[in-house]
Image: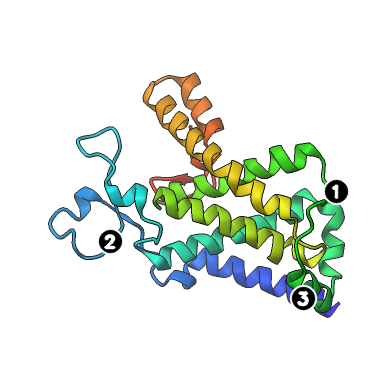
Amino acid sequence: MRVRVTCLILLAVLSLLAGTGAWAGNNQQPKLAEETAENPAEGDDVILPMGGEYEIGSYQDTELRPANLETYMYDTLIWYTVQWGGRLWWVRDKNIKIFDASFSTFWHNLTSAPEWNDGDTFLVNWVMHPFFGMLHYQFYRARGHSVWASALGSVIQSTLFEYAIEGWVIKPSGTDLIVTPAVGIPLGWSMEKLSDWLIEQDSGVARVAAYVANPTRLFVQNRNLGLINPL
């Protein structure tokens, strides 16, 4: 019972932080190039628009460390909270196991070596986990982070899921730790490019397909979070 209450309090705090932006102070967003044209040396994460007179700069695609670390940590907290919500909704038959787990079980799983035979099906390991790895990557990209910082975000979220969510119930899966980002990152990069191309076609059907290729368009638009962004 004590662990159940503790987990519920933790989820409430995470949701509150994500909703108020307390984790990242003012929750500053990376700025567009034209917004910082007069003083580009202030340390802002400058995002150069695609398809206009600008091209993506070298920082955007090559730097690993985010220019705005507070925003990066804030986005990591948001997506970790989303993973908790998705986990509780999708695998509802295991929820009671999470809330009834003990800290000793969690610590044992946290400090144990990952299991390579996790008992999941091919569909789960090689389709669903790469899909979520793709979503991890696309979320960070939609929030304005560089390619490599977004790839790192996919690795971080996969690790958090295996150790800090599933770890309450079972040992981390070595297969999932590798497959989720290793397949999800290139898939996310490809689908992002495809989605951008489909948007440029100025077609209703292509626009719907663009949202299918990059589902994060539904709740992140112009780097701003929203419940549902219209097509």
Distance of mark 2 from mark 1, alpha carbons?
46 Å
- Labels 2 and 1: the sequence-earlier one: 2
Three-letter residue code for mark 2: Asp
Residue 199 falls in which quadrant of the image?
A: top left
- Where does label 3 land, which residue? 107
Q: Of tags 2 and 1, which is closer to the observer?
A: 1
Q: Residue tagged by mark 2? A: 44
Where is residue 78? Give x, y as percent: 55, 60
Residue drawn 36% across the image and 47% down it: 61
Q: Residue 185: x and y, percent? A: 54, 44
Q: Is residue 155 left or right of residue 149?
A: right
**In this picture, residue 142 sits left or right of residue 30:** right
| Label 2 SS | loop
Badge 2, how many Cα within 10 Å: few under 14, some, many 20+? some
> What x and y, as percent, mark residue 83?
65, 56
Q: Is residue 84 visible?
A: yes
Q: Are marks 3 and 1 in contact (CB under 8 Å)?
A: no
Q: Is residue 55 above or below residue 112?
A: above
Residue 7's place in the image compared with 212, above or below, is below
**Is disc 1 surrounded by few (<14), some (14 to 19) or many (20+) residues within 10 Å?**
few
Q: Which residue is mark 1?
A: 119
Decide if residue 55 is on the left or right side of residue 209: left
Q: Amino acid at mark 3?
A: Trp
Label 3 SS: helix
Q: Amino acid at mark 1?
A: Gly
Residue drawn at the location 67% of the way across and 59% of the way down: 161
Q: Quadrant of the N terminus?
A: bottom right
Q: Secondary structure at mark 1?
A: loop
Q: Is residue 190 above or below residue 63?
A: above
Earlier in the chain: of badge 3 and badge 1, it is 3
